[in-house]
Image (cartoon, rainbow, N blue to C red):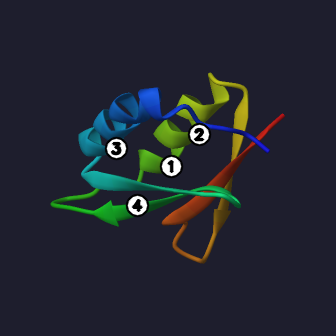
C-alpha cells in the first residue's frame, strides 16, 4: 500500500487549485483515498497533473467511478 505523506498535502492542494478543483484527502486505517470537487471553470488537465504529481513519488493513481473524481494510490 502506498502512503502519501500528509506533509505533502499543501502542495497537492495547490496543484488541484491551479486546475479549478479542491482535493480532499480521506485518511483511515484501511488506507488513503482522495476525492476531487470541481470549482469555477474546472480544467480536465487535472487528471494529468495528479498522475504526474504521484508518479514523481513512485505512486500510481487508481481512479474509480465514471467521472474519475475519486481515486486511491499505490506504489509501483
What is the quadrant of the N terminus in the image? Answer: top right
Q: Is residue 28 left or right of residue 13?
A: right
Q: Label 4, on which residue? A: 36
Q: Position of residue 34 (x, y in %)?
A: 51, 57
**Residue named by callout 1:** 47
**How far apart are the alpha carbons under marks 2 and 3?**
11 Å
Lower position in the chain sequence, tag 4 or tag 3: 3
Q: Residues within 10 Å of mark 2 (few under 14, many from 20)?
A: some
Question: Closer to the camera, 75 or 28?
Answer: 28
* Mark toward the viewer: 3 or 1: 3
Label 1 and label 2: CA atoms lie apart by: 6 Å
Q: Position of residue 8 (x, y in %)?
A: 45, 28
Residue lying at 60% horizontally and 33% vertically, measured from the top left:
54
Q: What separation in Å lies between label 3 and label 1 (alpha carbons)?
A: 9 Å
* For discs 4 and 2, the disc positioned in front in the rendered view: 4
Residue bearing mark 2:
51
**Tag 2, which secondary structure?**
helix
Q: Quadrant of residue 37?
A: bottom left
Work out how far the residue at label 4 is from the one at label 2, CA to CA, in angstroms.
13 Å
Disc number lying in front (4 or 1):
4
Instruction: State the SS at label 4.
Output: strand
Q: Specify the farthest residue to the front.
A: 29
> Is the C terminus in the top left, top right, bottom left or bottom right quadrant?
top right
Q: Residues within 10 Å of mark 4 (few under 14, many from 20)?
A: some
Cα–Cα span, label 4 and label 3: 8 Å
Where's residue 45, x and y in %? 42, 46
Residue drawn where x is 54% and y is 65% of the image: 70
Left/right placement of residue 74 relative to residue 19 reads: right
Residue located 27% across and 57% down the image: 42
Q: Are marks 1 and 2 in contact (CB under 8 Å)?
A: yes
Amino acid at each position: 500500500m502506498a502512503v502519501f505523506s500528509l506533509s505533502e498535502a499543501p502542495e497537492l492542494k495547490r496543484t488541484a487549485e491551479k486546475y479549478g478543483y479542491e482535493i480532499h484527502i480521506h485518511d483511515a486505517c484501511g488506507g488513503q483515498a482522495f476525492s476531487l470537487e470541481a470549482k469555477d471553470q474546472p480544467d480536465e488537465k487535472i487528471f494529468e497533473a495528479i498522475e504526474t504529481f504521484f508518479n514523481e513519488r513512485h505512486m500510481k493513481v487508481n481512479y474509480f467511478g465514471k467521472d474519475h473524481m475519486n481515486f486511491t494510490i499505490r506504489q509501483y
